[in-house]
Image: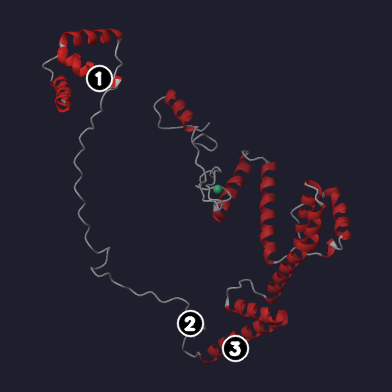
Amino acid sequence: MPRITGLKSETQRDRFLNAAKSYVRGGALARTCGAKLRTGGVCEQLALAGETRCLRHGGPTAARRFRERQRAGLRQGSVSPEEWARAEARRARNALTWAWRKDPRLPGRTIDLGPDEVAFVASAADKGVDVDALYPALADWLRWRWRRHQMDRPDAARWHKAVREELPRQRAAADAAVAWVSLGITDKRTKAGRAAKAALRAGGIERARAAVDALRSASSAAVDVDMDKGVGKPAGPLTPLPVRPWTARAAADGWKRRRSDRQKAPPAPPRPAKPLGRPPRVPDRPEDLAAYGAVLRAAGPQVRAMYEAIPRQEDRLRFLRDLAGYANAPDDAGAQRRWLGWVTAEDRRA
Ligand SMILES: [Zn+2]
């Protein structure tokens, strides 16, 4: 247990550590990731230790820090070698999947079918596909499909569709990726990338290659020309600047930073304490009800007529309560006011 300093006693230290348990990772009040999901919800995963997001939503830098912490944990013994190996395998798998998007010819696989590999190859051959001739990325994709539709949830129709319909689409995408690699283009948003894209659409890979070559020789020629005539003069940029250069624009009333601080508003006066409201009413006790009857009898026929004229039971009870209150404390202002209310209502009714 880590030594906690700055606490006054062992009891306080124990209590502190006990209370802190709710907030550490895995505790009831531990911080969750909270990233917005495409489904409209919010990520409920625990945030990584020392981070604000989970491994999925933390981004590459947080993932790198997580790996470094894991490595330190491996050295200190808090992370087991198996756990470390599993995590490293997962990272390698993810890295390979990303690399395949750029070049599907890279060797490797993310699934091992074991002894079922033979059955997989035979099943693919039945449908007319030679697994060995596929790019590693495509073979890997097909292995996952086979595993899904032939082992996990056997479905002959889905497997057939995967090989006959989905695989050709995957192959076309892989061929396109290979074409980009062969053109030497890693970013399609560059000038060469856009030119190659247009040429590829118009007339295939050869035309794209010609377009890219032409563009490259033109730009190197431009560099050569600049080098030739650039004697004592720095060569200008080859392309116009993509962004407008920054210029200072002063605000109408001067720079915000240079204005003196505005005076803060004076603090608001303290609010008066809120009245607590009426206390809950205690229900009438039996002896109170008996007393009400005695008060009503003593009050005389006029008051009794007022009482008889009240249609609702709860209003009658209220009438009796106010009458008894006035009879018991004729000097109390509240009792007077309540009773006067009944009298004026009677006057209005009459
Ligand atoms: Zn998350």
| Quadrant of residue 253 within the rendered picture | bottom left
Q: Which residue is mark 2?
A: 240
Along the line of sight, the residue nearer the viewer: 223 or 117: 117
Q: Is residue 144 left or right of residue 187?
A: right
In the drawing, does residue 23 fall left or right of residue 264?
Answer: right
Q: Amino acid at mark 3?
A: Ala
Question: Compared to 197, does 318 lie above or below?
Answer: above
**Residue 22: x percent and y percent?**
49, 33
Question: Secondary structure beneath disc 2?
Answer: loop
- Could you tell me residue 142's position as x and y percent? 78, 58
The residue under the point 22% across, 32% down is 273
Q: Nearer the viewer, residue 275 or 226?
A: 275
Q: Is residue 167 visible?
A: yes
Give the Cα separation between the discs numbered 3 and 1.
104 Å
* Viewer can see residue 105: no
Left or right, 290 with respect to 86, comes to left
| x 64%, y 86%: residue | 214
User: Which residue is the site of mark 3?
Assistant: 221
